[in-house]
Image (cartoon, rainbow, N blue to C red):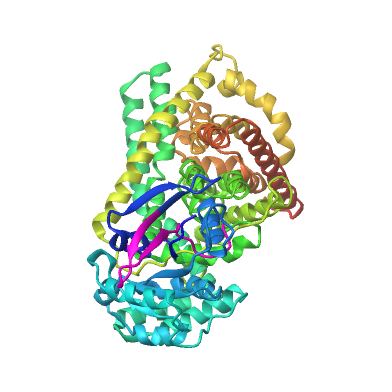
Amino acid sequence: MSALPLVALVGNPNAGKSALFNALTGARQKLGNYPGVTVERKAGRLSLADGRPVELVDLPGTYSLDPASPDEQVTRDVVMGKQVGEKRPDALVIVVDAANLDNHLRFALELIALGLPTIVALNMVDLATRDGLELDAAALSRELGVPVIATVAVRKRGLDHLRTELEALLNGAPAPYPATAQPQRDFDATRQEARRIARAGIVRETPSRRLTAAVDRVALHPVAGLALLLALLFVMFQAVYAWSEAPIAMIEGLAEATATLVRDSLPDGIVRSFLVDGVINGVGSVVVFLPQILILFFFILMLEATGYMVRAAFLMDGIMAKVGLSGRAFIPLLSSFACAIPGIMATRTIADPKDRLTTILIAPLMTCSARLPVYAVIIGAFIPARDIGYGIGLQGFVLFCLYLAGIVGAMLVALVLRLTVTKGASGSFLMEMPKYQWPRPQDILLGLWQRAVIFLKRAGTIIFTSTVILWVLLSFPRVPDGDPASQVDHSIAGRVASGLNVVLEPIGFNRDISLALIPAMAAREVAVSALATVYSIDAGDDEAALEQSLGDRLSSQWPLPTALAFLAWFIFAPQCISTIAVTRRETNGWKWPLFMVGYLFTLAYVAAGLTYWTATAMGLA
C-alpha cells in the first residue's frame, strides 16, 4: 500500500477524466487490475506545486454510487474505502462536463456528501463557451461548498490552479464555503438540487440553449412528455397510410401490368404459373408495401437525428422501471422495431444478466418492420378508409393501436418474467441528453436507401425462396384433368395445411391462414406472399378472380372475426428462424429460445382465440 497521499479522479462517463489524468501525470503512469476483478486500475504520479508527489488514480466513470456493473462497483468501493488492496482516497477530484452540468452535478452532490476533501474540476469550459454557455466557477463553488476550478484538460488549461488547490486541500485547508450537499438524499431531490445549482452558475446563455431547456421542460415532463410521444407516434402511423396511397397504387399497377404481359406472352402451364403465381403475385404482394416501410423509417430517422429519441428513452425509463426493467433496455427494444435481431444483439450493453435476459425474451414483441405488410394488407382489406376525426384516419388509428398493443404486451410479459423466471432487482439508468439539431437531408436519404436495399434484398432472397418453395408444394401433385377438386386442396401444401388447421380452426383460422403461417417462420412478410400465391393458384384461369387484389380476395372470403384474430396472432406470433438462432447464440443454449417460442405461441393462440370469440359473440361479420 502506497504511503503517498491518494487522490481519486471520479465522475460521469465522457466528462474528460482520462484527458485530465493524462495531462496531470504525463508518462508517469502504471496499469494493472484491481485485486479480484478484471477492472483496469490506472494510476500515476502527480507533483504538487511544492514538488510533493501524490498518487493519482483514475476511477471508472459512473453515474451514481449505486453500481450496475463491475466498473461502477469498483468506483463505489474505492471512494467508500471498501476496495481490497486499495486505501480510501485522501481527496477526490470530481470531473464534470461544463456543458452538461444538470446531469453531472447530481453525482457530484452524491460524492461531496461523503465528506472527503473534494475539488470539482469544471472541465471542457471551452466547448461550453463555444456552445453559448458561460459559467461562474466562484458561484458554483459557493453553492457546492467546495473549490471549483475551470479546466480544459486537452489544452492543459487550469492545471496549475488545480494543483495549488489540491495542495491546500491535502494540507488541511478548510473549504472556502460551508458544504451544502447532504447525505442520503433521494434521487429526485438530488436531481432538482443539481439543476438549481447549475442555473445559479450560469452567467450568460444563448437563446438556442434557453430554447432547448424550454422544449425539454415539455418533452421530458412525465405527463406532457408522454402525451407528446404518443402524439408523434400517432401522426407517424397516420402518415404511413395517408402518404403511401399513390406510390402503392403505382407499384400495384406495375405488378399487374407485368403479370398481364406474362399471361399474354406464355401459354398456360407450369412456367407461366411459376412466373405469375409464384414470383409476380407472391413476391410482388410484399414489395408493394415498401413505401409504407420507408415512411415509417423516415419518422424514426428524423426522431433520432433531431435528438428526440434519447428523450423518448428517458420518458420510457420510468414506465419500464415499473415492470422491472431499466432504461438500458429501451435502446435494444427500440432497435427491435426495425428487426429483433439487432435489438437482441444490442442487449450486450446491459450489465445485469437477468435484465438482459428479460429484454431478449420480450424483444420479439416489438412490432418489427416485417409485420407491417401483414398489418397493412389486413387493415386495407377490412378497415374502411374513412376519417374518425379531423385529419385522423381509421386505418392509421388501427395500425397505431396494433403497435401500442405490442408495447403493452411486452411490458406485461416483462413484469411477469421479472416476478418469476428472471426475478431480480432492476438497475438505475442515467443518460446524456444530446443537443437538438436539424437533421442533415443526406443522412436521412442514406438511411432510407439502406433500408430499401435491405428490404428488397430480403424480398429477393428469403421471401423469393420461400414463395418458390410454397409454389412448388401448392402446384404438385397436379389435379388430374376433369377432376373438379381444387389444386390447393389436392397439393402437398394444402394437405399439410388441412392437418394443421385442426388445431387452428377453433380460433377462427381457415386452411389458407394455416398454410401461410408455415413459411412465415422464415420471414413474417412471407405470410402475405403465401396468401397471394394460394389465391392466385386457386383462381386458375378465372379472369374476374385474377383481376382482384389480394385485399379484395381476403375481404370477400374471410369473415371479420377471422381477420381480427389474424392480426391478434401476429402481435404475439414467434419471430423468424433467424431471430431464434440469434437468441440461442446470445443465451448460449436452447433453453431460453425454446422457452421464448413456447410462450409466444401460447400468447398468440390465446390472443387470437379471445379476439375471434369476442368478435363472433358481438355479431361482427
Q: Residue at x 39, y 48 (%)?
A: 31
Residue 60, magenta (yes or no): yes
Which residue is nearer to you in this view: 474 or 211? 211
The answer to whether residue 64 shows anywhere in this view is yes
> Residue 496, image x and y in percent?
63, 22
The boundaries of the magenta stretch are 43-67
Horizontal side, residue 43 vs residue 36: left or right: left
The quadrant in which residue 104 appears is bottom left
Which residue is nearer to you in this view: 139 or 147? 147
Q: Residue at x 40, y 55 (%)?
A: 43
> Residue 211, image x and y in percent?
35, 80
Horizontal side, residue 551 vs residue 485: left or right: left
On screen, 549 above or below 502? below
On screen, 345 above or below 398? above
Residue 325, magenta (yes or no): no
The answer to whether residue 234 shows anywhere in this view is no
> Residue 141, image x and y in percent?
41, 84
Q: How many marks?
A: 0
Q: Residue at x 60, y 47 (%)?
A: 362
Which residue is nearer to you in this view: 467 or 596? 596
On screen, 425 above or below 153? above
> Residue 119, image x and y in percent?
42, 75
Q: Residue at x 31, y 54 (%)?
A: 28
